[in-house]
Image: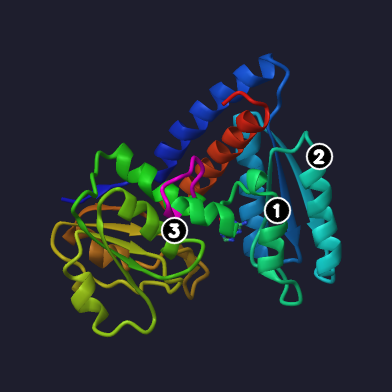
Amino acid sequence: MYKLIDGKEVSNHVKTKVREEVDALKEKGIEPALAVIIVGNDPASRVYVNNKKKACEFTGMRSVEYAMPEETTEEELLSVIDKLNADDSINGILCQLPVPKHISEKAVIERISAKKDVDVFSAENVGKMWQGDYDMASCTPMGVIELLDYYGIDVCGKNCVIIGRSNIVGKPMASLLLERSATVTICHSRTKNLSEITSKADLIVAAVGRAKFVTADMVKEGAIVVDVGINRNDDGKLCGDVDFENVKDKCEFITPVPGGCGPMTIAVLMKNTLLACKKQNGII
Ligand code: GUN
């Protein structure tokens, strides 16, 4: 019988701990604050941004939203980032991705001050992560690690297969698993004999962005399956990259979608913003 990894429960646990620390900071007159920039009208981005703002409310942090129209120029966006970088009352800055095509994602990521880069997307912060010299880690991969820790799953020596090589999930996920002494394989759209590789995995992290991509024949009996995907199926229902109904019975542990990794990304974002605030105020 598989065990369901409950991302809502774990994220509430993490956010509650953040709230306690935020309350203590507020007693000292310090209010952690996150600036969230959204450019354009992507409906999925709007949902993510609203969820991030709600998490700020839950944890007692201040959130400031900069909603900018689709036609915003790169220069205009960068000047908002400059203003937020210079504002000592703002501890974390994130620009929801993707940005419209005429704006360079790289330029945006690199403009955010490394100490306020709570997404951990900048080359400087990503480089530190790979060197194991970091206190803030990318939100989605760190959310996966927190889930594994909560359920007492030790990845040391385990054969871990990540499907997906994005900068947001696949690559930093590899870094965090490697740091915990897992044996890590990253697969992607060009990988040959994918199911041969995944069917030897003790842990699969699916981050491909294709609904029900991971099927039962790709999964070993007793595997742990973590589904980072957020897709819509033909009926518009939210579903992951894993064919949950058919895969679950082969697993020791599996994450659902929704209610698995999604809430954890936001919980780690709250942790990172709190940490950024403490560092900026000389508390740690
Ligand atoms: N778009 C998809 N995931 C993320 C994320 O974690 N942070 C930001 N800024 N944009 C995203």
Q: Earlier in the sequence, mark 3 or mark 2?
A: 2
Q: Position of residue 184 (x, y in %)?
A: 28, 62
Question: As rendered, which of 43 and 111 lies closer to the eye?
Answer: 111
Q: Could you tell me how far apart the alpha carbons at marks 3 and 1 are, in whole angstroms? A: 19 Å
Q: Secondary structure at mark 2?
A: loop
Locate residue 283, reporting x and y percent: 61, 23
Residue at which label 3 appears: 172
Q: Give the number of the disc on residue 10.
A: none
Location of residue 33 (image quadrant): top right
Would residue 178 appear left or right of 74 to someone viewing this image?
left
- Ligand 1 quadrant assignment: bottom right
Which residue sits at x=32%, y=46%? 5
Examine the rendered structure and indicate whether residue 209 appears above or below residue 125.
Answer: below
For label 1, the residue is 112
Q: Is residue 149 above or below residue 163?
A: above
* Of callouts 3 and 1, the N-terminal one: 1
Q: CA distance from mark 2 to mark 1?
A: 12 Å
Q: Amino acid at mark 2?
A: Asp
Q: Is residue 38 visible?
A: yes
Image coords of residue 21 (percent x, y): 56, 23
Q: Label 3 vs label 2: CA separation?
A: 29 Å
**Percent of width and height locating residue 282:** 64, 26
Image height of 85 relative to 206, above or below: above
Identify the element where label 3 is drawn. helix
Which portion, as a residue range, is magenta?
Answer: 130-137
Disc nearer the start of the sequence (2/1): 2
Instruction: Tell me what residue is drawn at x 40 percent, y 38 percent.
Output: 10
Task: Report the disc number at residue 87.
Answer: 2
Q: Colour mode?
A: rainbow
